[in-house]
Image (cartoon, rainbow, N blue to C red):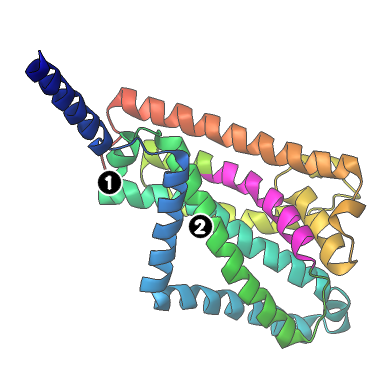
Amino acid sequence: VAAGGTAAGDAAAGDTATDTRDPRPATYYHLARAVLYREFLIFVRYPANAIGGIVVALFFFGLLFYGGQLLAGQALADSLEGIIAGYFLWTLSVGAYSSVSNDIGSEVQWGTLERHITTPFGFAPVALLKGVAKVVRTFLTSAVVLAFMLLLTGTRLSLDPITVVSVAGLAIVSVLGLGFAAGGLTVLYKRIGNWLNLLQFGFIVLISAPVFELPWTRFLPLAHGSALLQRAMVDGVRLWEFGLADLALLVAVAVGYLLGGYLVFHYATKRARRLGVLGDY
């Protein structure tokens, strides 16, 4: 009996040891940490590409600034603060949009898309977190671009971190939704890069939309967020000084376009599976 008890105890101890050695299921925390760490590695291991993005953004702003001085003169100087704020939001928008659409297109070309499909988290959460990680990186690079723009033009803006990050972050959430929709179409139709790049220039129209003359434009992505960001950076309005209706509309537009983009993404990937073209290129 004693021997049997000892054997049973050893077996129970062995089972306990086996249980402790079993791998624990990954959580969304582990996924977010892995995606952020991956983005950090890409940034530091390819510094020439990261610096090149900043240089290209500054080059285009230099063309806009010096070319505008030659053509518009004082008219440009009077609206320079708004142009800088709008250009800052445009760089964030392009980064947020391309973070999802271009990344999914690259996964399709590399043949690694199926790895995202077979994860226990699902394709959409992985793509969304990768987009969020790239948005964080874009915020850092766009902040550098903004600093250079202010030094280049000698302009001063109100840069309350809480207000700028909150308003700009919610504004580009709607662009993430557009990126999701574009990513779904990329999975389905593969090569549509020319159409995707064309939409990036449409962001300029959205950012400069006349929301005060045409109130319905507030429901378009970026338009209402751009108007609030201009008030925050140019006029010095803080986040808690905005009206509740303005903030509620900003959140509603962000959530609405993100959900709409997710639905398009879900339908496109589901159709690609049904047609058997998910991994084809």
Q: Nearer the viewer, residue 168 or 18?
A: 18
Q: Nearer the viewer, residue 217 or 119?
A: 119
Q: Earlier in the sequence, mark 2 or mark 1?
A: 1
From what the image shows, is residue 61 above or below residue 257? below
Query: Is 141 within the magenta?
Result: no
Please name the amino acid that badge 2 sits on.
Lys
Q: Are marks 2 and 1 in contact (CB under 8 Å)?
A: no
Magenta segment range? 160-179
Q: Secondary structure at mark 1?
A: loop
**Which of 184 and 48 lies nearest the eye of the viewer?**
48
Q: Is residue 222 left or right of residue 76?
A: left
Q: Is residue 63 above or below residue 262?
A: below
Q: Residues within 10 Å of mark 2 (few under 14, many from 20)?
A: many
Name the residue that disc number 2 marks. Answer: 134
Identify which residue is drawn at 37% across, 47% down. Answer: 191
| Amino acid under disc 1 | Thr
Q: Residue, x 62% and y 69% (percent of image)? A: 142
Identify the residue under disc 1.
112
What element does badge 2 sit on?
helix
Marker count (numbered): 2
- Cα distance between the residues tagged 2 and 1: 19 Å
Residue 80 image offset from top left, x and y in percent: 81, 76
Dominant secondary structure (helix, strand or loop) of the stretch shown in magenta: helix
- How packed is label 1: few (under 14 Cα within 10 Å), some, or many (20 or more)? few
Please name whichever residue, 114 or 214, is drawn nearer the observer in this view of the structure. Answer: 114
Question: In the displayed structure, would residue 28 be above or below residue 75?
Answer: above
Residue 183 in view, yes or no: no
- Quadrant (top left, top right, bottom left, bottom right) of the C terminus: top left
Identify the image quadrant of residue 45: bottom left
Q: Quadrant of residue 127?
A: top left
Q: Residue at x 68, y 59 (%)?
A: 204
